[in-house]
Amino acid sequence: MALPDSAFIGAEIPLEGPAFDEFAEPSPSASEDEIDEGGGAENDPANEEPSSIRIAATKGGSPKRRAAPKGFVVNTAACTGKGSKDLFTIVANELAWRERDIETRPPRPPLQATIYCVMQTQDMLDRLPLLVRRHCWISRYLGLLDLCDKGNFARMALACEDLSEPNAWDFNPKTWVLPDQLAQVREALAKSKRTFIVKPEDGSQGDGIFLCQGVRDLDIKMSTKSNKAGVVQKYLDKPLLLDGIKFDLRLYVCLIGGSDIAPPLVYLCREGLARFCTEIYEEPSSKNMHKCMAHLTNYSLNKRSDKFEHSPESMEEVFDTGSGASKRPMTAVLRRLQDENPGFSMDAFYDTVAAIIRTTVAAMAPVLVGFSHAAAAAGTPLAAESSSFQVLGYDIMMDTSFKPYLLEINNSPSLCIDEALALEP
């Protein structure tokens, strides 16, 4: 089965107007996996989960460096350890841009238009003064890490829901913030027999997440936590399943630029990841709520299972709709859903997800401007327009009626390459 061309079409998502406008067809070189650094947490690269982004390699195993004409310098000096540097190198070579992976301390103003690839906040802060040079960019926004924090995002979403039209935020599961809204959580648990999911505010890769039913269950499980900060959400207890297994979807969204009078450009990649549990799903009960590999789709948890299915070895098998891998290209899963369910439409799915992205970015954009103003007031020289861009990971889950729900926005979706798959010429 050949990979459809549409799998790699990107789409701009304006904050007003049509949901999709085709803008480019990037090289079909990256297709499959990621590291979940979890809700914006800045993890030590040594602790990252291995991924399986599959790329085309030249004969001999590594991409061939091209001669660099005039253009951007891609500065990867801040990308250390196991991380995204390999991918930045591949992109620079593909575009015939020069890579610079050694840098003076402190960094000096560049003589040529430069893209600074950074992974940590301090690396971004060290380089902000350099962005006043024309055509210099950096791969992080001031403040976006804080906005993607589970608690902060929940507070923002709650405020926006109060100010928006009814159902404008119905893609966001009912959420409470701990410890601020503990009384409301206890009241909701006392009135409902539904299951709730509790996520620690500083957690990542599924660490510390648990399900609960009832006030006593919550109190017992919270008593073991030293940090009580987190969010509580109504659990989606009737998720869409494939072969009886629960899954979620990771979509990649790129924000570019922005200013006081113009929001950032927003692009959605039509390809993403489908991440599967490794145990058959059962509606949660006191007897099975502890089975995290049936309820939580986090790769960091499911990779430990002896039932974890690794990806096939050929591109054709990777994109086959019949693949049973625990991580699959999102388009393969969407095509299977469309083939097997007359009520599901890939186009409608993308339109709905685009609306979710449009709504959330519109809420975050003014806050990002505020962070820039605060930095300028503190004496950091900044350009009038943002010279930032950033790739975010939107985690989506559908229910049995194919309605997408936003689980979280990941500030640092992994771009790490773990294994390569040669493409046929």
Image (cartoon, rainbow, N blue to C red):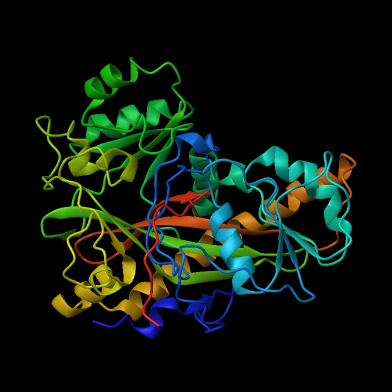
Residue at the image position 28 percent from the left and 83 percent from the top: 2
Q: Can you name the residue that lies furthest to the front here?
A: 60
**Rendering coords of residue 190 (x, y %):** 24, 29
Instruction: Name the residue: 82% across, 66% down.
Output: 113
Residue at figure coordinates x 31%, y 77% from the top left: 346
Q: Quadrant of residue 239?
A: bottom left
Most foreground residue, 370 or 102: 102
Tell me the quarter of the picture where residue 399 sits: bottom left
- Is residue 303 visible in the rendered image? The answer is yes
Q: Residue at x 20, y 52 (%)?
A: 309
Whether residue 166 is visible, yes or no, is no
Q: Position of residue 389 (x, y in %)?
A: 66, 60
Q: Is residue 387 above or below residue 352?
A: above
Q: In the depicted view, which residue is nearer to us: 128 or 47?
A: 47
Vertically, is 81 above or below 273?
Answer: above
Query: What count of labels does the image hold?
Result: 0
Q: Quadrant of the N terminus?
A: bottom left
Q: Nearer the viewer, residue 163 or 157?
A: 157
The front one of 278 and 177 is 278
Position in image of residue 138 (x %, y %):
72, 56
Where residue 410 appears, x then y in whole percent? Answer: 49, 49
Quadrant housing the C terminus: bottom left
Q: Is residue 31 left or right of residue 327?
A: right
Q: Is residue 350 left or right of residue 289?
A: right
